[in-house]
Image: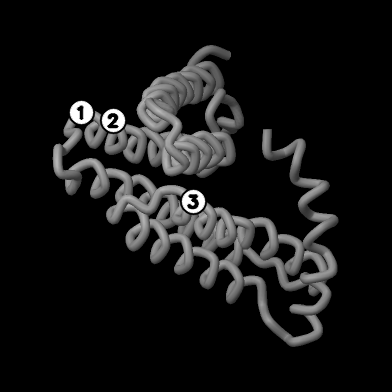
Amino acid sequence: MLNILRPAVTRVMTPLGRALARWGISPDVITTIGTLGVVASALVFYPRGHLFAGTLVITFFVLADLLDGVLARMTGKGSTWGAFLDSTLDRLGDASIFSGLILYFVLKDEPEIVLAAVALFCLVAGALVSYAKARAEGLGMTANVGIAERGERLVVVLVAAGLSGLGVPYILAAGLWLLAAASAVTVVQRMVHVYRQAVVR
């Protein structure tokens, strides 16, 4: 989904990337600022029930995940460290979004424990999806399969939270259940894919 949108978003961000390059700002700085913005926004807005405003601010900072890549290509400062930093901070940003939603469900006047548990499952399953790919690549294999990669997971949770903030009933619950199922399926898909490479030859 996001791979289709990436070229268009990249074209929009290219002028900003040129400006940042002229100012001497490195991709790592953009990565770090973007992650800190996501973490702060998710943990400030979501627990207080400001789902729509929180989603808008989080989305703004999530776009830094694309901007740092644009800047790296323009400046030629892409590096192994930068790729490691980006992937590591992505996990932190994702965790903060679901943690914010968990706090939102738990701190409500009438706590929704089941949905808090589903959000926790999404957090763990999302981490497993990313770990499975990283571990496979560390062992010299691939795991680029699955119906719910990071981009798709972010779109689902942010759209669901934003629409819920606008008053659309049941959309956040539906989004989280859908995401939980898709993430679980993706973990299994990646395990099967790696198994076939490692054992079935």
Q: Amino acid at mark 2?
A: Val
Image location of residue 197, percent across then percent down = 55, 21
Q: CA distance from mark 3 to mark 2?
A: 19 Å
**Residue farthest bottom in this picture:** 23
Q: Amino acid at mark 1?
A: Val
Q: Is residue 62 visible?
A: yes
Q: Quadrant of residue 123?
A: top left
Q: Is 138 in front, or is 185? A: 185
What crowding class fits label 2: few (fewer than 14 Cα within 10 Å), some (14-19), or many (20 or more)?
A: many
The residue to which callout 1 is attached is 114
Q: Is 62 in front, or is 68? A: 62
> Which residue lies at the image location 51% right of the left edge and 44% below the top edge?
138
Image location of residue 134, percent across then percent down = 50, 43
The residue to which callout 3 is attached is 55
Label 3 secondary element: helix
**Residue farthest top in this picture:** 200
Q: CA distance from mark 2 to mark 1?
A: 6 Å
> Which residue lies at the image location 24% right of the left edge and 36% below the top edge?
116
Determine which of the numbered discs, if any, sits on residue 118 in the image.
2
Between circles 3 and 1, the one closer to the viewer is 3
In the image, is residue 190 above or below residue 29? above
- CB contact under 8 Å: marks 3 and 1: no
What crowding class fits label 1: few (fewer than 14 Cα within 10 Å), some (14-19), or many (20 or more)?
A: few
- CB contact under 8 Å: marks 2 and 1: yes
